[in-house]
Image (spheres, rainbow, N blue to C red):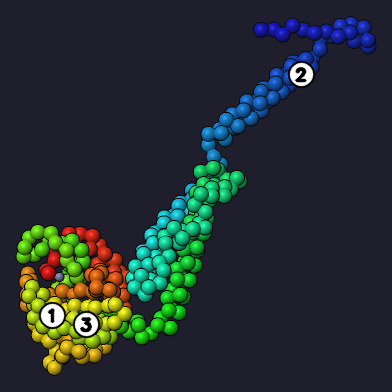
């Protein structure tokens, strides 16, 4: 299509001449418009792209962020496990050491006190709310663990002082395993192995071959050494300070051992057997405090590892028939 021609008046030639440069200007004008359009649409396109797709730098930051959050979550899980272990230590501290020594137990509420249970964790406002919550909880767990360790440490210090000032009494309190064998039946209500019904098992049973050595568990005096019906051959030691221990179903006594004889912790007193009413050879061991049966498990602390203690506690929680 022919472009309409434009003319201008040329004074030199005194006539109208067509404008030659018009085509070029139109071309330049339309090109400029296209470039401008391109820039505007290009900018819109790029901004849309960046909304949906991250740059490599952003991707690297996101990966790092995910890794850090995973690390914090992992630390939080570890801290929860540590809290569980501290609970076990606290329970042992109360049961095995403090109650036996006559020291006041530290109630769990006090051990957990000033941990800011009701106080909301401090939130970091510079990160996403979920991350802030995670960090705040992690910080609180660390504070709780610090607090629990401090109380546990104070408790052990107190026990240590007690040991140093009450050494004679401590030699008399039953504190070791009477045989070098595995505990197979715990204290409490148990199915009787011969009678078949549930009855109170006033001691613990250590499975052992006939003839295994039996040791006194604390200093004291032999108060009885005789055949006692269903208990079979039995030795009773009076430890003083209100404590008494009984060793039943023995096959024999150590030669020459007599009632009234003074005895020290670790002294050999007899040998395991199956005398009396039993389902097999074992040692039935009882601890009495002020005339009442108590759980002997709490009086094995001198040579029981925390792992062993936990295992025995689990055993006590199941209804395992006693050997009586
Ligand atoms: Zn028993």
Labelled pair 3, 2 in contact (Cβ < 8 Å): no
Give the Cα separation between the discs numbered 1 and 2: 124 Å
The residue under label 1 is 234
Report, in whole angstroms, how far the alpha carbon at label 3 lies from the one at label 1. Answer: 10 Å
Disc 3 crowd rating (10 Å Cα; few below 14, some 14-19, many 20+) is many
Residue 311 as seen in the image, left or right of residue 151: left
Disc 3/disc 2 C-alpha distance (Å) = 122 Å
Tag 3 residue: 237
Residue identified by numbered label 2: 25
Which residue is rendered at x = 89% and y = 6% of the image?
Answer: 15
Work out which quarter of the rendered image holds the C terminus and state it: bottom left
Can the viewer see residue 85 in this picture? no
Residue 231: image location, x then y, percent: 10, 75
State the image coordinates of residue 75 (x, y, percent, origin top left): 45, 57
Q: Mark 3 falls on what kind of element?
A: strand
Front: mark 3 or 2? 3
Q: Classify the position of the N terminus by image quarter.
A: top right
Q: Earlier in the sequence, mark 3 or mark 2?
A: 2
Q: Secondary structure at mark 1?
A: strand
Relative to 20, 43 lies left or right? left
| The quadrant where residue 227 appears | bottom left
Q: Any atom of ligand 1 within 8 Å of the CB at mark 2?
A: no
Residue 233, percent from left and from top:
10, 80
Crowd rating for badge 1 (residues with CA inside 10 Å; few <14, some 14–19, many 20+): many
The picture quadrant where one finds residue 220 is bottom left
- Residue drawn at x 47%, y 67% is 151
């Amino acid at each position: 299509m022919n472009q309409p021609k434009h003319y201008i008046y040329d004074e030199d030639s005194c006539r109208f001449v067509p404008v030659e440069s018009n085509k070029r200007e139109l071309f330049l004008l339309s090109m400029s418009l296209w470039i401008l359009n391109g820039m505007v649409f290009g900018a819109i396109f790029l901004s849309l792209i960046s909304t949906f797709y991250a740059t490599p730098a952003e991707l690297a930051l996101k990966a790092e962020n995910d890794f850090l959050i995973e690390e914090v979550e992992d630390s939080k899980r570890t801290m929860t496990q540590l809290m569980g272990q501290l609970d076990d230590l606290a329970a042992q501290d109360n049961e095995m050491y403090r109650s036996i020594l006559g020291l006041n137990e530290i109630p769990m509420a006090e051990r957990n006190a000033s941990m800011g249970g009701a106080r909301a964790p401090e939130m970091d406002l510079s990160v996403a709310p979920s991350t802030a919550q995670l960090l705040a909880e992690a910080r609180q767990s660390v504070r709780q663990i610090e607090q629990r360790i401090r109380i546990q440490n104070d408790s052990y210090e107190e026990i240590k002082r007690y040991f140093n000032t009450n050494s004679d009494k401590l030699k008399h309190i039953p504190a070791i395993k009477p045989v070098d064998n595995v505990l197979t039946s715990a204290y409490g209500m148990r199915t009787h192995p011969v009678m078949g019904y549930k009855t109170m098992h006033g001691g613990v049973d250590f499975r052992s071959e006939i003839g295994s050595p039996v040791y006194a568990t604390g200093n004291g005096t032999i108060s009885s050494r005789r055949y006692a019906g269903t208990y079979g051959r039995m030795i009773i030691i009076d430890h003083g300070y209100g404590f008494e221990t009984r060793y039943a179903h023995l096959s024999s006594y150590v030669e020459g051992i007599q009632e009234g004889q003074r005895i020290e912790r670790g002294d050999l007193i007899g040998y395991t057997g199956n005398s009396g009413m039993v389902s097999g050879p074992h040692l039935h061991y009882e601890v009495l405090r002020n005339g009442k049966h108590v759980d002997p498990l709490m009086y094995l602390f001198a040579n029981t590892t925390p792992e062993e203690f936990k295992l025995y506690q689990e055993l006590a929680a199941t209804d395992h028939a006693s050997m009586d």
